Every structure is written in C-alpha cells, then in structure tokens.
Amino acid sequence: MSSRVLPHLVTVADLVPLLGRGDVRVVDVRWRLGDPAAGPAAYARGHLPGAVFADVDRDLAGEPGERGRHPLPSADAFEGVMRRLGIGDGTRVVAYDEQGGATAARLWFLLRYFGHETGAVLDGGIEAFTSGGHALETSVPEPVAPASPFHAVPRREMIVERAELARDSGHSKGVLLDARAGERFRGEVEPIDPRAGHIPGAVSAPFAGNLAGGRMLPRDALLARYRALGAASNETVAYCGSGVTACHDLLALAVVGFEGARLYAGSWSEWSRDPGAKVATGG
C-alpha cells in the first residue's frame, strides 16, 4: 500500500498549495449526533474548494445493530465509498469538520485501518480555513476518477473486540481510554445508549482535552497529557460512544508517535447493550 505522503495533521498553510491537484482529495466530514441532516446542510451552505462530502452514518460506518451504532464498514463498502469520492490507492486525503477534527479523525482512522497511510486531518477545520481569509464554495464537484482504484485490506491488529476487553478486565497490556465527555464517563447522564457509566478499568480522556481554541494542542502538551493519563504507549486502546470521537484520541496519540494505539470499534454503544457486561460509574 501507499507510503505516507502527509503528516497525520496538516495546517491550512500546508493544504492551500494542494487544492485543485488531481492526486489530492479534500473531504468534508461534518456531522452532528442525533441530527443526520446537519452535515449535508452545512456542506451545501459552503465547503472548502473542491471538497466532497462523506456522511459518518452512511459512508463511514456499517449498519447499526449488535456491534454498536457505528460499526466499522466492510472492506467492500468502504472501497465503494472511496471510489465514489474519487479516492484511489495513491490519493492524498485531507479530512475536515467543524469540531476540531472530532469526526474528521474517523476518516483518517478508516484509511489507516484499510491499509492506506495517505490521510490527514486539517487542524482547526473549516474555521481555520475561513479565518485565514480563504473563501468557501457551494458548487458540488464531480470527482475525477483516480489514477488507480481504491483497495481496502483491513488491518485487524488496529482494533480490539469486546470479547478481548471482557477477558482482560484489568487491561494489563495497557490503558483503556474513554473519549466521551466526563459526565457520560461518570454515568451522570446518558443521552443515547442503553446504560450509563463506563467500562471497568477505563480512564476518562475526553477528546476535547486534545484541543485549545478548536486546534490540536502542541505536540509537547499532547505528550504530557497522555503521559499523565498513563496512556503514552502503543498498547493503549480508545473507545467512545460509538467509535467515532475515540479516533480523535488515536489521532492525538499518533501525532506524538504512538501509532500503534487501537480502537474498540463497538465502543460504549456495543458494551452497554449487553446486560451481562460489567459497568462502572463515578470518577
């Protein structure tokens, strides 16, 4: 598969010279939990020049069910989405959103999971682009066919299944990070999943803690954060509500050099629906 030709995180200054190039695809991944129309509506109002739209529910996840609200898509399904968006094996992909990369990181992770180190997240997202004096557009581009088709080969070592977590309840091989907001971790609120709380042994690591002013913290600050959490290791596992925002914690870890951290894809939406799964509450 293609070698990495972009860092995990790119700035607006990095991106602007690449706009319009046939080997680069910019992807709008704006999405709101509980509001499936929000992303497409935001894209229609204005998006980065040449950007195509990927829907988290439809394009970056499989059918919801026993494996959670956003299970990983199949290789065939992801190949189809990438080809529809004009992304091939050698295409460089820059994903953005309006939440500091919280949903754009899902596409970054899926590209890596399916064997492609060609994806990146735009630091600061659409706000960084417009605040830099760059104009948006409303026209919908017709993706140009890539030079080569996209091939998806899952890297199973990048994910953790529920059964593995259940067996290793103490997480002896590393730290289990919960990327949800602290009140959901503690079980004070649960707006969408069957039960409130967190997986026993997990550590609260809200993805928002990776950000300052909508942009990723400097590398040294990220490293200090994850060392304080005991998670600066390739043995780290991250989860969230449904496997979307946990990818932001994985992105932050990759930025500081821990690219081997893994995703529990089913996340709380899978764990909490099993009446036999243990649940912890509090801090």
Image (cartoon, grey):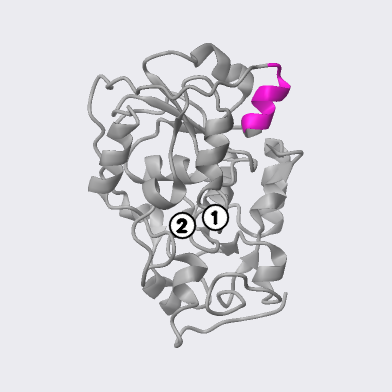
Could you tell me if residue 53 is visible in this image? yes
What is the crowding at mark 1: few (fewer than 14 residues within 10 Å), some, or many (at least 20)? many
Question: Does 33 appear above or below 5?
Answer: below
Contact between labelled residues 1 and 2, with CB atoms less than 8 Å apart: yes
Q: Where residue 246 is drawn, which disc sits there? A: 1
Question: How many angstroms separate mark 2 from mark 1 (CA)?
Answer: 7 Å
Comparing marks 2 and 1, which lies closer to the viewer? 1
Residue farthest along the bottom direction in this orientation: 276
Q: Quadrant of the N terminus?
A: top left
Q: Residue at x 55, y 27 (%)?
A: 47
Rendered location of residue 118, percent (x, y): 40, 30
> Which of the 4 image quarters holds residue 140?
top left
> Which of the 4 image quarters holds residue 35?
bottom right
> Which of the 4 image quarters holds residue 145?
top left
Identify the residue position indicated by label 2 in the image.
263
Residue 6 part of the magenta segment: no
Query: Of callouts 2 and 1, which one flags the residue occurring earlier in the amino acid sequence?
Result: 1
- The kind of secondary structure element at disc 1 is helix
- The kind of secondary structure element at disc 2 is strand
Q: Residue at x 54, y 55 (%)?
A: 246
Magenta stretch mostly in which secondary structure? helix
Rendered location of residue 28, percent (x, y): 50, 34
Q: Which residues are magenta?
A: 126-133
Q: Specify the amino acid type for callout 1.
A: Ala
Rendered location of residue 31, percent (x, y): 54, 47
Could you tell me if residue 96 is visible in this image? no
Rendered location of residue 83, percent (x, y): 28, 33
Question: Does 140 appear above or below 19?
Answer: below
Question: Does 51 appear above or below 267?
Answer: above
Q: Nearer the viewer, residue 111 or 222?
A: 111
Q: Residue at x 54, y 73 (%)?
A: 193
Question: Does 120 appear above or below 56?
Answer: above
